[in-house]
Amino acid sequence: MENLLSVIGYIGTGLVIGAYAPQIWHLWTEHCSAGISERAYALWVLSSALFLGHSITIGDAVFMVTQLVNMIALAIILVLARRFRNQICTAHARQLHIQEQFR
C-alpha cells in the first residue's frame, strides 16, 4: 500500500511538471512576461523551500522531490519573467486591447 501511495505521489509530481511546462514554454519562446507576478512567484519559491525543509525533516521522499521540482520551475519562471520584463506577445497584446475596449 505504501508503494502505491508513493506512485500516486510521483504521478502528482508529474502533473506539477506538466502544469509549469506551458508557462515556462511561453516565457521562453514568446519572451512574454504578461500576467506574471514576480512577487507571487517569489513567495511560492519561499513557501516551497519551507515545505522542502519540512519534507526533509519528516523524511518524505515524494514530498521532497515535488518541492524540488516546484522550486526549480518557479526559479526558471522568475528568471525568465525578469529577463523579459515588460515584454508582451501579440496574443496577450490583443487580449489587453480587447479588454480595454470594454472598460
Image (spheres, grey):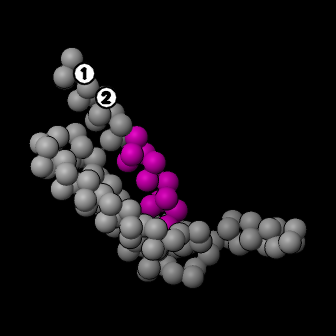
9 sits left or right of 17 in the view:
left
Disc ID at residue 8? 2
- Judge the density around disc 2: few (<14), some (14-19), many (≥20) Cα neighbours within 10 Å: few
The residue at 82%/73% (across/down) is: 100
- Judge the density around disc 1: few (<14), some (14-19), many (≥20) Cα neighbours within 10 Å: few
The quarter of the rendered structure image containing the C terminus is: bottom right
The residue at 49%/59% (across/down) is: 23
26 sits left or right of 6 in the view:
right
The residue at 38%/70% (across/down) is: 42
Amino acid on which the number 2 mark rests in the picture: Ile
The residue at 44%/79% (across/down) is: 82
Amino acid on which the number 1 mark rests in the picture: Leu
45 up-or-down from 56: above or below: below
Q: Position of residue 96 (x, y in %)?
A: 74, 71
Q: Position of residue 37 (x, y in %)?
A: 51, 71
Disc ID at residue 22? none
Q: How far, Cα to Cα, is label 1 from label 2?
A: 6 Å
Tell me whether the residue at label 1 lies in contact with that at label 2, contact meaning CB atoms closer than 8 angstroms: yes
Q: Which residues are magenta?
A: 15-27
Disc 1: which residue: 4
Q: Quadrant of residue 71?
A: bottom left
Q: Position of residue 64 (x, y in %)?
A: 20, 47
Residue 11 visible in the picture: yes
